[in-house]
């Protein structure tokens, strides 16, 4: 009596090596893509935080200016001129005003200048002096240029009515980025603040 021998096909060593190698390559690519996405998401969140800092600083500045009075654009918008409100149609990097229309308080000053590291930042002083300036924007936000354009501060006189409400146009240009990333996001922002108190 004869028995028929059957052979069950299996993986050879070479096939096993190829299969494991392909699996390793696929997993390596997937893990690399996942890490890249996590890193990109982290940088995007950091950049969003930086831009939020700029938005909050600008929004606070516009609100303060809107509620103030006696916009000072004298001497190319250099502050601390006590002779009264003055226009600055040419634009400048320093602007002062009376907060909340209260003449008993020192003037508030907003200024654009570079810090010790050469990064352009927005500064604020509530003491009425340039020496009291402190930064209100993060170091990750680099302001390249900032101008205050002041119009409408001329008070009406007999025979010369004033139909323009005092206002300040703020123009900002700069870039923002996060540590560890060469990518920078550029921005151009324009905001207008009109004096809330009627200029009568």
Image: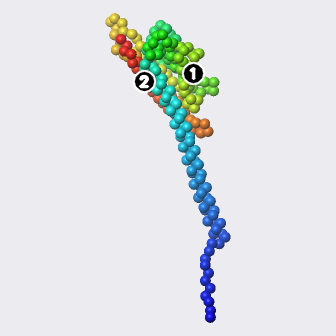
Quarter of the image with the N terminus is bottom right
Question: Residue 30 occupies which quadrant of the picture?
Answer: bottom right
Would you place residue 4 above or below residue 30 in this image?
below
Residue matched to label 2: 192
Name the N-terminal-most of marks 1 and 2: 1
Q: Position of residue 153 (x, y in %)?
A: 41, 13
Q: Which residue is at the far top?
A: 158
Q: Are marks 1 and 2 in contact (CB under 8 Å)?
A: no
Q: Position of residue 68 (x, y in %)?
A: 44, 17
Q: Is residue 154 visible from the viewing direction of this image?
A: yes
Quarter of the image with the C terminus is top left
Which one is in front, 108 or 179?
A: 108
Secondary structure at badge 2 equals strand
- Residue at 48% x, 10% y is 104
Would you place residue 28 above or below residue 15 in this image?
above
Q: Position of residue 157 (x, y in %)?
A: 36, 6
Labels 1, 2: front one: 1
- Residue at 48% x, 23% y is 61
Q: Position of residue 163 (x, y in %)?
A: 34, 14
User: Horizontal placement of 120 versus 148: left or right?
Assistant: right
Residue matched to label 1: 134
* Mark 1 surroundings within 10 Å by alpha-carbon count, few (fewer than 14), some (14 through 19), many (20 or more): some
- Residue at 54% x, 15% y is 127
Q: Which residue is at the far left?
A: 159
């Amino acid at each position: 009596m004869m028995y028929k021998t059957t052979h069950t096909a299996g993986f050879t060593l070479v096939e096993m090596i190829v299969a494991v190698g392909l699996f390793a390559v696929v997993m390596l690519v997937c893990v690399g893509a996942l890490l890249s996405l996590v890193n990109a998401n982290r940088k995007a969140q950091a950049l969003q935080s930086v831009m939020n800092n700029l938005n909050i600083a600008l929004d606070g500045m516009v609100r303060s200016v809107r509620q103030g009075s006696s916009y000072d654009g004298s001497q190319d918008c250099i502050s601390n001129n006590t002779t009264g409100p003055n226009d600055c149609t040419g634009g400048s990097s320093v602007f002062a005003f009376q907060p909340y229309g209260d003449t008993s308080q020192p003037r508030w000053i907003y200024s654009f200048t570079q810090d010790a590291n050469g990064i352009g930042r927005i500064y604020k002083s509530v003491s009425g002096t340039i020496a009291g300036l402190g930064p209100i924007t993060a170091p990750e936000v680099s302001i390249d240029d900032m101008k205050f354009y002041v119009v409408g501060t001329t008070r009406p006189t007999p025979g010369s009515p004033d139909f323009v409400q005092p206002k300040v146009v703020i123009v900002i240009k700069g870039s923002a980025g996060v540590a560890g990333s060469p990518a920078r996001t550029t921005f151009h922002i324009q905001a207008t603040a009109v004096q809330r108190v009627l200029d009568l």
